[in-house]
Image (cartoon, rainbow, N blue to C red):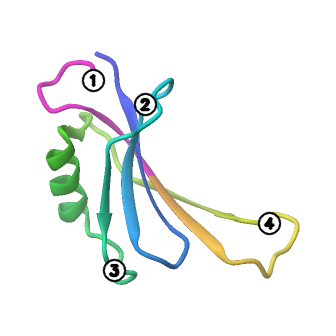
């Protein structure tokens, strides 16, 4: 069964969750119109369901940080969460 990657990110503005579909020009996206708090796991699950996806069995969210300018440690931090997902029907998306 093929899995895809869902990512959730914020650069201090609204949080957005999207499913990465390589080769596609548009990715399924969900946006929370808030900066805080970070969307809970339950909120992420509901957002994925609204997009037609679910976490893959055993998948957990992992977090990393990035910045717009990696050479400047004073630049704003971009938080990124990622998890493996699959189509809600259990097949490939």
Residue 13: assigned label: none
Which residue is identified by label 2? 21
Q: Position of residue 93 (x, y in %)?
A: 27, 23
Name the secondary structure under disc 1.
loop
Disc 1 residue crowd, few under 14, some 14–19, many 20+, Cα 10 Å? some
User: CA–CA distance between discs 2 and 3?
Assistant: 25 Å
For label 4, the SS is loop
Identify which residue is drawn at 15% across, 56% down.
Answer: 46
Q: Which mark is residue 93?
A: 1
As measured in the structure, the alpha-carbon distance from the residue carrying label 4 to the one carrying label 3 is: 24 Å
From the viewer's perspective, is 26 left or right of 55?
Answer: right
Whichever of labels 2 and 4 marks the residue nearer the N terminus, that label is 2
In this orientation, which residue lies closer to the viewer: 91 or 21? 21
Q: Which residues are magenta?
A: 82-93
Name which of mark 4 and mark 3 comes first in the sequence. Answer: 3
The x, y position of residue 22, in whole percent, is: 49, 27
Residue 69: mark in rendering: 4
Q: CA distance from mark 1 to mark 2?
A: 9 Å
Q: CA distance from mark 2 to mark 4?
A: 26 Å
Per the image, the residue denoted by label 3 is 34
């Amino acid at each position: 069964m093929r899995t895809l990657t869902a990512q959730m990110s914020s650069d201090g503005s609204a949080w957005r969750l999207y499913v990465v579909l390589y080769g596609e020009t548009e990715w399924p996206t969900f946006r929370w119109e808030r900066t805080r708090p970070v969307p809970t796991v339950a909120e992420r699950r509901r957002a994925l369901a609204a997009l037609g996806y679910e976490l893959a069995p055993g998948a957990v969210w992992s977090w990393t940080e990035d910045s717009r300018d990696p050479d400047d440690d004073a630049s704003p931090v971009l938080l990124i969460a990622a998890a493996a997902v699959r189509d809600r029907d259990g097949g490939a998306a």
